[in-house]
Image: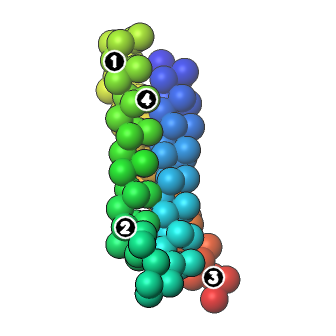
Amino acid sequence: MILPIVLGAACGVLGFAPLIVGLRLARKATPTSNLGHAGALLLGVFGSFVLLAGTLIVCIVVARDAVLPFTLAEVVALIVSAVVYGASKLVKK
């Protein structure tokens, strides 16, 4: 039972990485760039969704009995990663 929770938490933290990349791309976007601010953010959200859904599908195929703890750990880790990132940015300013 511990292994799906640990793997889900790791996937949740890794699932936050595309959001950070999308945010950095949006900050670097110029008003005349093709990607634009919203495009970069949506690209990050899409990348995060693909990563999280992909790992969930792999968990469903490999170990169906561990899907609930894996999913809950993944979601909680994603939320905690977002809160920690936001709090660290707030403290730095």
N-term-proximal mark, 3 vs 2: 2
Splitting the image into 4 quarters, where does residue 88 fall? bottom right
Which class describes the residues within 10 Å of circle 1: few (<14), some (14-19), or many (20+)?
some
Residue that mark 4 sits on:
55
For the residue marked with disc 1, what is the amino acid? Ile
Q: Residue at x 55, y 30 (%)?
A: 6
Element under disc 1 = helix
Q: CA distance from mark 3 to mark 4?
A: 32 Å
For the residue marked with disc 2, what is the amino acid? Gly
Residue 71 is situated, as x and y percent measured from the top left of the image, at 36, 33
Residue that mark 1 sits on:
60
Between residues 63 and 43, which one lies in front from this camera angle? Answer: 43
Residue 48 is situated, as x and y percent measured from the top left of the image, at 42, 48
7 left or right of 70 in image: right
N-term-proximal mark, 3 vs 4: 4
N-term-proximal mark, 3 vs 1: 1
Compared with 93, 58 (above or below) is: above
Q: Residue at x 54, y 46 (%)?
A: 13
Which color scheme did the rendering employ for the protein? rainbow
Q: Residue at x 47, y 18 (%)?
A: 1
Residue that mark 3 sits on:
91
For the residue marked with disc 4, what is the amino acid? Thr
Element under disc 2 = helix
Let me know if residue 45 appears in the view: yes
Q: Nearer the viewer, mark 3 or mark 4?
A: 4
Residue 78 is situated, as x and y percent measured from the top left of the image, at 45, 50
N-term-proximal mark, 1 vs 4: 4
Which class describes the residues within 10 Å of circle 2: few (<14), some (14-19), or many (20+)?
some
Which class describes the residues within 10 Å of circle 4: few (<14), some (14-19), or many (20+)?
many
Let me know if residue 80 appears in the view: no
Residue that mark 2 sits on:
39
Residue 60 is situated, as x and y percent measured from the top left of the image, at 33, 18
